[in-house]
């Protein structure tokens, strides 16, 4: 029986490997143009989506994003709110051109992202993905991963801004504590805060937080946001969220539903003008319950 079982495991593995290859082959390869432009000098980044449609290549059952238009000004925090599967992550994945738009265009300081080297875009971007990626190594190594030359003071300052310093100091060896493979010895909220500290240490011109405070409580989240404001005054930040508490203080909130932006504005504007936003607010406020896909 054991050989049969092993044969099944191998068959399942090779089937999934084939499937992975299929997916990899359908994902559009983002190619640099032969004569790329330089991004305009200076740290400030104004990012604009103009009539952006998007679907993953080869999966044409409807658009993931449909006619998305907005501007993120330098220094602004733009929050992207909506249920699971609404297209929030797709918006932020297009900012550093992980994929190409199907139609429309995305510009940084007026330059189409397709006309720039992708490596130039990525130099300016700090990303905290939905799934926190930690490495085996010390807590300090994990925070300074993108900037190995950072000083101890800088590492600690970034950890303090991410509300991670206190729990790090309570670990057996503080910043020298070893993180087990994939961070199994840390809680979800601790892992998220380490990932935020890592991104903050880069002081990126463009920061993307993709549902990156979902595992921390609302009070800690508010502290992180306050610290980020002073830490990244001149950065353009994108914050993807399902929880309304995450977006209350953003400079601009985009309400995304089924791939469309159905409303945009500040919290107080949307409370006046958007029934969808009011509904989300009413359903969540007070109990901090996450907005599940309706």
Image (cartoon, rainbow, N blue to C red):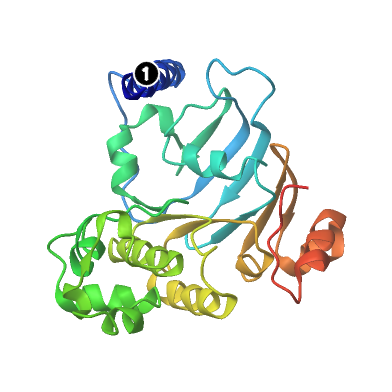
Judge by depth and name the residue closer to the eye, 48 or 292.
Answer: 292
Element on which disc 1 rests: helix
Q: For this view, does 28 lie left or right of residue 33?
A: right
Q: Residue at x 29, y 40 (%)?
A: 120
Can you say whether 123 is above or below 214 in the image?
Answer: above
Q: Residue at x 40, y 20 (%)?
A: 8
The image quadrant of residue 60 is top right
Task: Say few, some or many: other residues with alpha carbon within 10 Å of mark 1 (under 14 / 14 to 19 / 20 or more).
Answer: few
x%, y% of residue 93?
A: 48, 40
Question: How many marks do you count on the picture?
Answer: 1
x%, y% of residue 67?
A: 69, 32
Can you say whether 231 is above or below 192 in the image?
Answer: below
The image quadrant of residue 146 is bottom left
x%, y% of residue 250?
A: 61, 66
Q: Which residue is mark 1?
A: 4
- If the image is split into quadrants, where does the N terminus sit? top left
């Amino acid at each position: 029986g054991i050989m049969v079982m092993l044969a099944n495991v191998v068959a399942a593995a090779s089937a999934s490997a084939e499937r992975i290859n299929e997916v990899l082959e359908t994902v559009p390869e983002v190619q640099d143009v032969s004569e790329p432009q330089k991004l305009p000098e200076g740290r400030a980044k104004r990012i604009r989506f103009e009539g952006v449609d998007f679907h993953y290549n080869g999966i044409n059952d409807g658009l993931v994003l449909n006619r998305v238009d907005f501007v993120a000004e330098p220094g602004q925090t733009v929050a992207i709110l909506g249920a699971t599967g609404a297209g929030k992550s797709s918006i932020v994945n297009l900012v550093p051109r992980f994929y190409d738009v199907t139609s429309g265009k995305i510009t940084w300081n007026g330059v189409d992202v397709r006309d720039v080297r992708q490596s130039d875009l990525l130099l300016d971007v700090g990303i905290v993905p939905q799934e926190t990626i930690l490495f085996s190594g010390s807590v300090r190594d994990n925070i300074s991963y993108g900037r190995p030359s950072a000083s101890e003071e800088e590492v600690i300052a970034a950890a303090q801004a991410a509300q991670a310093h206190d729990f790090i100091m309570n670990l057996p060896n503080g910043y020298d504590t070893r993180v087990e493979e994939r961070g199994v010895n840390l809680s979800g909220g601790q892992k998220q805060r380490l990932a935020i500290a890592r991104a903050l240490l880069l002081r990126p011109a463009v920061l993307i937080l993709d549902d990156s405070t979902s595992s921390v409580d609302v009070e800690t989240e508010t502290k992180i946001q306050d610290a980020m404001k002073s830490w990244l005054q001149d950065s353009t930040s994108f914050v993807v969220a399902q929880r309304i508490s995450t977006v209350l203080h953003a400079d601009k909130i985009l309400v995304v539903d089924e791939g469309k932006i159905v409303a945009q504005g500040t919290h107080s504007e949307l409370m006046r003008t958007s029934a969808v936003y009011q509904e989300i607010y009413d359903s969540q406020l007070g109990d901090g319950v996450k907005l599940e896909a309706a």
